[in-house]
Amino acid sequence: MGSFIEILCAVLIPPVGVFLRFGFGLEFWISLLLTFLGYIPGMIYAIWALTK
């Protein structure tokens, strides 16, 4: 389960929230790509990645 700070960052700036948990791993790059394609898909993926 993601911490409050990670979840908050995932809502405000999705790649930062994922970075705090996974660093520059695959999850970060997926989150960054989805955020560039659309803010909402990036946010959904970031929250999903942090809570799985």
Image: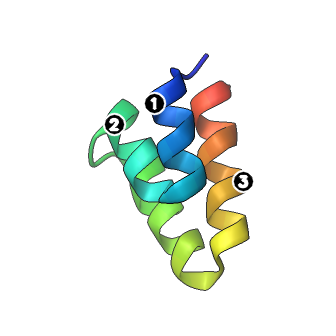
First in sequence: mark 1 vs mark 3: 1
State the residue at coordinates (47%, 59%). 13
Is residue 32 placed above or below 2 in the rendered structure? Answer: below
Q: Which residue is mark 1?
A: 5
- Name which residue type carries label 1: Ile
Which quarter of the picture shows residue 43? bottom right
First in sequence: mark 2 vs mark 3: 2
Q: Which residue is mark 3?
A: 44
Residue 33 spot, x, y in % from top left:
50, 73
User: Badge 1 local density, few (<14 within 10 Å), some, or many (20+)?
Assistant: few
Residue 49: give its label. Answer: none
User: Badge 3 local density, few (<14 within 10 Å), some, or many (20+)?
Assistant: some
In whole angstroms, how far apart are the C-alphas of marks 1 and 3? 16 Å
| Residue most extreme to the top | 1
Q: Which residue is mark 2?
A: 20
In whole angstroms, how far apart are the C-alphas of marks 2 and 1? 9 Å
